[in-house]
Amino acid sequence: MAKKKTLFECQACGFQSPRWMGKCTSCGEWESMIELSAEQIKFLKETASSSSSTPAIPRAKPITEVDEDNITRFGSGSKELDLVLGGGIVPGSLTLIGGSPGIGKSTLLLKIAGNLAAQQQDVLYVSGEESAGQIKLRANRLGANHEKLFLLSEINLASVIAEINRRDYRFIVIDSIQTLYSEETPSAPGSVTQVRTITFELMRIAKSLHIPIFIIGHITKDGSIAGPRVLEHMVDTVLYFEGDSNSELRLLRGFKNRFGSTNEVGIFEMNKEGLNDAKSMAGRFFDKEKLQSGSALTVIMEGSRPIVIEVQALVAEAYGHPKRSCTGFDNNRLNMLLALLEKKLDLPLGTYDVFINISGGIKINEPAADLAVIAAILSSYRDRELSTQTLFLGEVSLTGEIREIAALSQRLKEMETQGFSKAVIPNRPIEETSIKSFIADEVSKVVEWM
């Protein structure tokens, strides 16, 4: 009797093994191996054999003889989204947007679809999670009711492809990739094989028909896109929504972009009209009139945009093992700064709980806020309020030095715009004479109690 052939595949990375394993040797995930059926194994073999039988072998040529692609872009109707994408939507691109439930992914893309439909472009919105009637209700609130916007409530990939071929669509939204399934792949929607097959088909459609396609992806508990990592590798652009769903502000950050930079961040605000571009960032992440002990102000750079934010710290006596917790700041860097304060200033912070919070739901990814974190910690420890006119800018090294930071002039100009008069900065000359007046002449008075 012939032995049954078995094959197991990792749900996280797609790694295949002839035997079951508790931990995937490729990505390290536990309990992620599932057994494939005989139909699935047959399909994988047929796919591998068809892809290996290439009719012609291409030849490499010198890069000096290769013609550059002429990348064109068109506006989405949202300045913030265009900023994150690098200047606009690229025809033929495949973009993946992820984020927590309720953060605004579907709202943003329906708004963009309505903007493009208002420009007399045929737009297709495919939803596998909501009915056309539910989308219609949201479109009424967003003002996205246009005759050029077509809705399709379908989860069968073949039906979606048939609809795409039926009309000359200029923009397509898939909500979401985990709900679609292909009849050629005998597995459940959202599985590794299904997501990989569907993403490949969507990529083929985008490139061959020169249509930009935006895909919404679910995320896991740790904040990454659910499904195989190959999904993020196959698409051209990966965008993530950040921020508290209970707050009106949302941040859209690019983590991969084959057509532009990933340094820019789009800022949106949620209101009754949907997710719209934030009109002004002045005072959004701090309240100058309500600063108390434990609060310090600084300026961070989100791409090319300087933003004044508030760093909050709470230092309290510990009962038992001291706790260190951060929201929006790196916990390992906090431990380094606390060790530095204990060594250089002889502060007994090892017996205190220390909590750090960055207001507004922003996550700091640069060391320029080190000095502000230290100032907030000392302010809370001494229970002394800092000046509401002073900002703290600087990276703190392990030796206790305050080092230079990038784009210092831009940060100081943003201070000037928002009416601040003093700044504690690294010791370096400032070329712009208009900025000199905003450097604290009496820094020692500002931080003498430190």
Image (cartoon, rainbow, N blue to C red):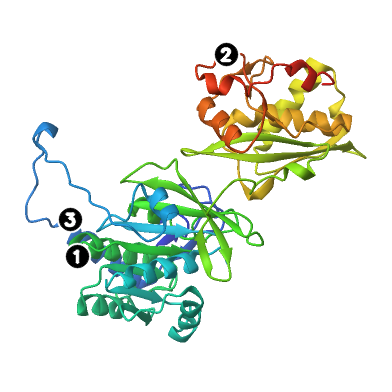
- Looking at the rendered image, the disc whose residue lies closer to the viewer, 3 or 2, is 2
Q: Say if residue 229 shows up in the picture.
A: no
Pointer 1: what residue? 209
Q: Give the residue type at disc 2.
A: Arg
User: As rendered, which of 54 and 121 lies closer to the eye?
Assistant: 121
Element carrying mark 2:
loop
Q: Is residue 53 shown left or right of residue 433?
A: left
- Relative to residue 181, is residue 432 depicted above or below? above
Towards the viewer: 102 or 339:
102
**Numbered label attached to residue 129:** none
Q: Amino acid at mark 1?
A: Leu
**Residue 245 location in percent, x, y?**
63, 61
Query: Can you tell which of label 3 and label 1 is closer to the viewer?
Result: 1
Kindly indicate the quadrant of the structure image that contains residue 216: bottom left
- The answer to which of marks 3 and 2 sits earlier in the sequence is 3
Residue 297 is situated, as x and y percent measured from the top left of the image, at: 69, 35
Q: Mark 2 sits on what residue?
A: 428
Q: Nearer the viewer, mark 2 or mark 1?
A: 2
Please state, as top left, top right, bottom left or bottom right, where the C terminus lies in the image: top right
Quadrant of the rendered image containing residue 14 = bottom left
Q: Relative to the observer, which residue lies in front, 27 or 322?
A: 322
Percent across and percent down for residue 107 are 49, 68
375 over 73 or under it: above or below: above
Q: Which residue is mark 3?
A: 52
Q: Is residue 350 above or below residue 233?
A: above
Q: Residues within 10 Å of mark 3 (few under 14, many from 20)?
A: few
Q: CA distance from mark 3 to mark 2?
A: 61 Å
Q: Of label 2 and label 1, which has the lower sequence position?
A: 1
